[in-house]
Image (cartoon, grey):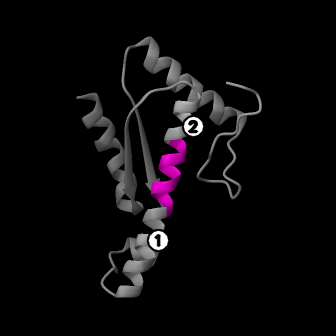
């Protein structure tokens, strides 16, 4: 990985990753390769509380939800691309939305281990 490469970080305003995040990405790629394992990326899009509480019935709320979902899908696409650009092979990219889906990360990880 070239020293000038930038990685995305969904938590920072500029979407720049720290050197530690770059090392973690590299370690995940190396570990997947060394163990002949698949590398999956799970991205959880954060929703405002009024959407996360299931209040999606109105057209406006549905439009807002879809906008957050589109932005989250774009972030997942960028993260996937960056792993591939760093030499990794992504076996799957998984998008989940909202607080409830944070709890489902373990379920997704468990299914991937099976």
Q: Which residue is mark 2?
A: 82
State which tag comes first along the sequence, 1 or 2: 1
| Contact (Cβ within 8 Å) of mark 1 with mark 2 | no
- Where are the magenta residues, as a range? 71-79
The residue lying at 37 percent from left, 14 percent from top is 36
State the image coordinates of residue 113 (x, y, percent, origin top left): 28, 29
Tell me the crowding category of disc 2: few under 14, some 14 to 19, or many 20 or more residues within 10 angstroms, Cα based. some
Work out whether 74 lies above or below 1. Answer: below
Is residue 6 rendered to the left or right of residue 54? Answer: right
Q: Is residue 100 magenta?
A: no
Work out whether 85 lies above or below 45. Answer: above
Q: Is residue 74 magenta?
A: yes
The residue lying at 65 percent from left, 32 percent from top is 22
SS category of the residue bearing label 1: helix
Tell me the crowding category of disc 1: few under 14, some 14 to 19, or many 20 or more residues within 10 angstroms, Cα based. few
Q: Quadrant of residue 52?
A: bottom left
Q: Which residue is mark 1?
A: 67
Toward the top, the furthest residue is: 34
SS category of the residue bearing label 2: helix
Quarter the N terminus occupies: top right
The residue lying at 47 percent from left, 71 percent from top is 67
Q: CA distance from mark 1 to mark 2?
A: 23 Å
């Amino acid at each position: 990985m070239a020293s000038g490469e930038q990685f995305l970080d969904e938590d920072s305003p500029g979407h720049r990753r720290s050197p530690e995040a770059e090392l973690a990405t590299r370690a995940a790629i190396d570990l997947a390769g060394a163990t002949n394992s698949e590398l999956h990326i799970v991205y959880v899009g954060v929703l405002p509380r009024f959407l996360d509480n299931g209040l999606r019935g109105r057209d406006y709320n549905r439009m807002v939800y879809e906008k957050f979902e589109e932005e989250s899908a774009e972030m997942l696409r960028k993260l996937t691309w960056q792993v591939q650009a760093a030499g990794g092979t992504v076996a799957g990219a998984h998008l989940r939305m909202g607080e409830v889906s944070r709890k489902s990360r373990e379920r997704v990880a468990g299914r991937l281990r099976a």
